[in-house]
Image: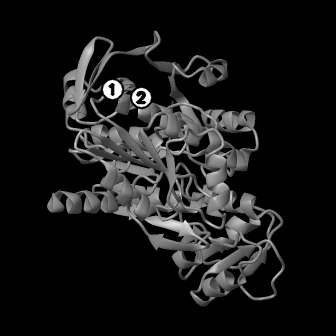
Amino acid sequence: MEKIRLNEALNAMGIACSDPRVIAGIHDDSRRVGRDWVFVARNAKAERYIEDALVKGAVVVCGHIDPRADVYAVEDVEQVLRQLIACCHPGLCEHLLCIGITGTNGKSSTAYFLYQCLSHEMPCLWIGTHHVLCEAFQEDSVHTTPSLCELVRLIEKGRDVGIRCVIMEVSSHAIAQKRIAGLAFDHILYTNIRSDHLDFHHCEAHYRYTKYALRHYRKAGGRIIVNHDDPRLRALYPLVEGNCVTYGTRLSHFHLHDVETVRTGLRFSVNGDRYETAVCGRFQAMNLTAVIALCHLLAIPVRRLQASIRALVPLDGRMQKVWTRPLAFVDYAHTASACLALYRSVGEIAHRRIITVIGCGGERDAGKRARIGEIASSCSDLCIFTSDNPRGEALTDIFAQMRQRAQDNIMIFEERAHAIKFAVKKSGNDDIILVVGKGDEKIQLINGRAYAFDDAAILCRALREKEERA
């Protein structure tokens, strides 16, 4: 971080300030600030946070007039925040290899696979859904893409421990809210675009073009890596001025072919080179092809890359195998397209029946519920609808929407743990159990409270108890 005096920074923005102290840091979370920090109060109702920051010796920038010393009122808090970040952290991504990954499905798996492969080549930092990870430290993350202040903190923390590469999942919310302002990516990877987050974006076109806008954060000479199988991404090609690299099962720069799904994982080829992995799920072959394409652009030799792909560990909650007989998976799929991909992959594994436990989140994109209910019930022999972060919404309303186009093979359990235990009770050794929607989340959000909840742990415990009783 540059040593910038407070008066220099604020005066440059037209804000009268005579305070000469050097800014120690900038954050929008009062818990993160200390003496000589700048706390940017983005919430108009942040009075108690302002008081907390002042007690700690911080300076406050907010959007309303406050007579107290060390509080500066500005018209546009967001703009001032971005200007302060740019002033104190110029060239944040310089001398770092920065890779941004966006898309409706596959961001986390692709980012984690890439993190593992590139960590053999250089020290890396992965910032993504629920996870911040590097060799020197790891943290939990609430959002797929943290706030701008958190991103700056994490990148600077990574710099301090010698990272040379940042791999970041970038959500549509983060692009729309300019959480990545001031960042620049050497390469940007698009996994796919489906219909999602319409509670925020209101229409598919706005969602799609918000995703496309990530291209503006590309460094000069950087590449855009695109899933060529996805027709929704083809409108992006003329916008990136020839800097596009394609991958997929269609004729592409990196052509995926000869995919085999086996009980132990996957075998597949890219441009004639054969790869094997313990990662399960046919849909993961596409994510791995994206990783291979990017690693080729970084000049990593094929043999070294084949070894890295062979050694990959799957991400918890992404077609995570937790039991063998019956074969039981936990998966994060929470869109219609992700559910379809999951069932296509599972259907290729020998089985007697498929038993699914699934729900839809409350207060989120209600329009996808009927389709998810239809897919899950039609692809299962027994389908159990249950809660999945209902938040403040009535479960009866969620279930009613999920049932609109569902088959008659469904059951409903309001308690998710009871649903999982019932699925185990009804399963045989040759069946497949899918617990879908929450993945590696460790909480259930119900009526404003977060309750400890772990799909994989509950599923494993139920299966172990059943085995012990047998």
Percent position of residue 321, x then y: 28, 45
Q: Quadrant of residue 456?
A: bottom left
Residue occupying image coordinates x 57% and y 41%: 372
Residue furthest front in the image: 408
Q: Quadrant of residue 259?
A: top left
Residue occupying image coordinates x 69% and y 79%: 19
Q: In screen coordinates, is 129 left or right of 345?
A: right
Percent position of residue 351, x then y: 28, 33
* Residue nearest the observer in this picture, 376 or 285: 376
Give amino acid for label 2. Arg
Secondary structure found at label 1 = loop
Q: To which residue does mark 1 refer? A: 348
Give amino acid for label 1. Glu
Can residue 207 be spotted in the picture? Answer: yes
* Residue nearest the observer in this picture, 414 or 315: 414
Q: Is residue 385 above or below residue 194?
A: below
Q: To which residue does mark 2 refer? A: 344
Q: Is residue 55 above or below residue 426?
A: below
Secondary structure found at label 2 = helix
Q: How many marks?
A: 2
Screen quadrant of the C terminus: bottom left
Residue occupying image coordinates x 59% and y 77%: 30
Residue occupying image coordinates x 44% and y 52%: 127
Can residue 187 be spotted in the picture? Answer: no
Percent position of residue 404, x then y: 66, 43
Packing grade of label 2 (10 A; few <14, some 14-19, many >=20) is: some
Packing grade of label 1 (10 A; few <14, some 14-19, many >=20) is: some
Q: In screen coordinates, is 96 left or right of 144?
A: left
Q: Check whether the beta carbons of the residues at disc 2 and disc 1 lie within 8 A of each other.
A: yes
Q: Is residue 132 above or below residue 171?
A: below
Q: Is residue 270 above or below residue 213?
A: above
* Residue nearest the observer in this picture, 405 or 154: 405
